[in-house]
Amino acid sequence: MLVIGANAAGMTAASRAKRLAPSLDVIVLDASPRIAYSICGLPYRISGVVKSFDDLVLFTPESLRNERGIEARVSCRAVEIRSPQRKVVVESRASSGVKTGTETETIGYDKLVIATGYRPRLLDVEGMGPSSRGNGVFTASRLEDGEAIEDWLRDRDRSVRRAALIGGGYIGLEMAEALTKRGVRVALVESESNVLSSVDPEIAEKIAEELTRNGVELFTNRKVRALELRSNGDVESVVLDPGKLRAPADLVFVDVGVDPEVELAVAAGVRLGPSGAIAVTDRMETNLPGVYAAGNCAETLHLVSGSAAPIALGTVAAKQGRVVGENCAGRRTRFHGAVGTAIVKVFDLFAARTGLNESEARRAGFVPVSSTITGGFSASYFGPPTGVVKVIGDETSGRLLGAQIVGDLEAALRIDVAAVALTSRMSVEEAAQLDLAYAPPAGALWNPLLVALNTLAREL
Ligand SMILES: Cc1cc2nc3c(=O)[nH]c(=O)nc-3n(C[C@H](O)[C@H](O)[C@H](O)COP(=O)(O)OP(=O)(O)OC[C@H]3O[C@@H](n4cnc5c(N)ncnc54)[C@H](O)[C@@H]3O)c2cc1C
């Protein structure tokens, strides 16, 4: 079994297969020098909560071999899949003495797993391009990106005082908190009218308030027109439209979306789905014999919309990897799909979502009706309300379509109840009768999620 990409999806596939079939020869290869790390912890290394990048690494090639019996090849890029011969051509960065070079070899496989993840986008604007990455413009998808940000922040000659974050998605928001905690003044630029476009405005507004309360300067409804660079090529400021507004920046972090990393697969004849990610069966098989795909390079069936698209979350990648691992070990396991459950911490608030938001629901052909309430997740005599809950249902069928919560951690984590209800295809009325736990310090007799669902049931 050969796995290309040794992170959430690839490592889980390799580990599961080896556990179920110990006699299987499992090789994982990765273009990066590191494997098996939690990229999700990157913002917390930048903020200083996590002390070292090494703390985010779960396995080195040595520990992987010793503890799991899996061979890992690092700094080793797959450059061609020869599917008819069941071989992969790889290029390794080799060093002997003072010389470094590239070595090419072919590795055979019975089962191949493509787990190449995604590639963050840059904007097509003046001053931004692959070369600007070395001059203070960053994205995040690999541990090396975090190390480069850390090096940039630590360079004493540079003294990073201001940062411009382009894009107010999950990672942009986490980086806003991280850089603020490092004493950097942050300007957050978002082309939409609200940050966190994956939730509806009522929820996003609370996050915007929290950002502003913590000193983050928000520029919503603004597009980046250009980056201005110093004479040495380092970034100096971001120019915004409308109005050619200038936001000075010693560091720019870009979080404007991702593209599935599929070039290698496409060149080998792997079929893509309409979303541009690899089309897979429910056993995570591609159209090529013996070739599976998992993680952010592959499509995921969304259980509410019914359509397939990549869901760029580690949770989904790991589950798909597990399914692939089981199938490579000879089981017949299916991946049923996902509902897109996600949570993000922004300073003292957490925002969580599952299913579809209102605009996604409309695009999927539903007629969304919603109810939003503010409520306490413990009895009122234990303190003030702690969260805002929004639930969305379909006017035509009465089906529950999605939920969003913003509040403290306890409030936001209740999103998991809604995720279960969505996975079970419950109607709003069924979900409103869920038997949830209650004792005064642990919850409210009328859990706000149930209150919101009951209000929605009445409206429907
Ligand atoms: C800063 C940050 C925070 C995040 N926080 C969360 C979170 O809180 N919750 C959550 O669910 N998700 C989070 N995510 C998303 C999550 O990390 C990804 O969804 C997950 O890592 C995807 O796993 P993957 O295995 O599909 O791909 P990746 O993790 O991208 O791994 C793909 C690997 O393939 C390798 N590769 C690619 N092409 C080749 C090739 N040709 N040859 C060899 N190797 C190759 C790459 O080097 C890479 O190591 C976060 C992501 C980032 C960047």
Image (cartoon, grey):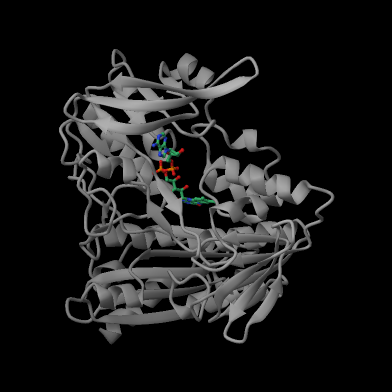
Looking at the picture, how far across and down is residue 139, in whole percent? 56, 54
Horizontal relation, residue 283 to residue 221: left or right: left
Horizontal relation, residue 153 to residue 19: left or right: right
Above or below 157: residue 285? above
Depth check, front residue: 305 or 34: 34
Q: Residue at x 25, y 52 (%)?
A: 337
Q: Residue at x 27, y 52 (%)?
A: 300
- Asked whether residue 441 is in view, the answer is no
Looking at the picture, how far across and down is residue 141, in whole percent? 51, 48
Depth check, front residue: 260 or 452: 260
Depth check, front residue: 231 or 237: 231
Q: Residue at x 25, y 83 (%)?
A: 460
Q: Quadrant of residue 23?
A: top left
Q: Residue at x 47, y 64 (%)?
A: 352
How many labels sit on residues? Answer: 0
Depth check, front residue: 390 or 300: 300
Q: Quadrant of ligand 1?
A: top left
Above or below 267: residue 33? above
- Asked whether residue 166 is in view, the answer is yes
Residue furthest to the right in view is 157
